Image: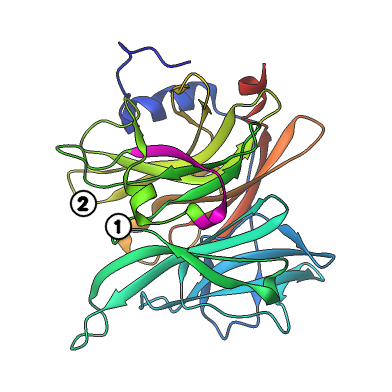
Amino acid sequence: MQASARQAKSCAELFEQFQRERPDARGEKLIFSGVGGRDVYNITAPFLDEGDWVIAGRVEDRASERSEVCFFVERGGEWTIREGSPVFALQDPFVSFIRGELVFGGVEVYFDNDDPHYVTSWRTVFYRGGRIRDLEPFAKGPLTMKDIRLVDMRNGRIGVFTRPMPVNDARAMIGFTEIGKLEELNEETIENAELLHDQFVKVEWGGGNEAHLLRNGRIGVLGHVARMDEDNIRHYYPMTFAYDPVSRTHTPIKLIASRDMFPDGPAKRPDLEDVLFSGGLHRHEDGTATLYTGVSDAEAHRIVIADPFLEYEK
């Protein structure tokens, strides 16, 4: 696990290492219908709700940042709006099951009163319920913090991953804390999370997108790591690492996919062409896993890869 002398690797170093080990895998685009020509991206992995496998996705006009999160079910090879499900005015949805209860969330964005296209701030908000149609708000994160994720732990408590930015002279860091029950999730608890060091170089950033309790009690984190190049082009890569809540150590970040492993397609803007935003990982019993990801802030794809969490369970 973590060594105190270890230094974070840059995105360029991580990508160079990944290119030497890259899997022979090819992704596929998911087709969505019922959204009136809008884009669907930054999706969750499918999860069960009342007998249906459901995906939550960010739905948005190409020229706008005003989003809705809708729920989709697969019918005849297409993902279509699930009738009767609620719609949320959020971005970048996520789901987890905490003590058997569905926890859903996303990013609530605030716009300037005089300029409807100018974003003034944002925060992560949380809903809970036995099923999608019963979801009710119960918590919110601090202003300007995304990528807050929850996970059941082997000790019976709830793990909380956070993502403050900036932190001193670092652009962003990931934090971790524990709570005893969902009612304890609040801004103060989130802000006081212990920081995980040596994950990102100071000018780069990243965050957790989904957390999995592993067989040995460690937590496997699916996330993203990102950088901005000298031409202000963004580069986002899906990554994983494992966190040990007993020793409070973590493994190095490891990339698991890159944009060129997926079909060509449009981007929301030219600076977003090389963006993969991890949505969720569906693990299979044969040692593979399906990664669901947003692509270039315009599409949603999936790809079957070797299960990246298996090495953390050894």
Under circle 1, the secondary element is helix
Q: Quadrant of the C terminus?
A: top right
Residue 297 percent coordinates (x, y): 43, 62
Q: Residue furthest bottom?
A: 114
The amino acid pointed to by label 1 is: Asp
Residue 141 can be seen, yes or no: yes
Residue 257 can be seen, yes or no: no
Q: From what the image shows, is residue 21 above or below residue 190? A: above
Identify the magenta region.
Answer: 174-183
Residue 112 percent coordinates (x, y): 22, 81
Residue ID for mark 2: 232
Q: From what the image shows, is residue 178 above or below residue 277? A: above
Under circle 2, the secondary element is loop
Q: Which residue is at the front of the view, 148 or 58?
A: 148
Seen at 33% across and 55% down, the residue is 145
The residues bearing labels 1 and 2 have C-alpha atoms spaced at a distance of: 7 Å
- Mark 1 crowd level (few <14, some 14–19, many ≥20, 10 Å Cα): some
Left or right: residue 222 versus residue 282 is left
Looking at the image, tell me whether mark 1 or mark 2 is earlier in sequence order.
2
Q: Are marks 1 and 2 in contact (CB under 8 Å)?
A: yes
The amino acid pointed to by label 2 is: Asn
Q: Is residue 175 magenta?
A: yes
Residue 253 percent coordinates (x, y): 44, 28
Q: Residue furthest left?
A: 169
Left or right: residue 45 versus residue 20 is right
| Numbered circle sitting on residue 271 | 1
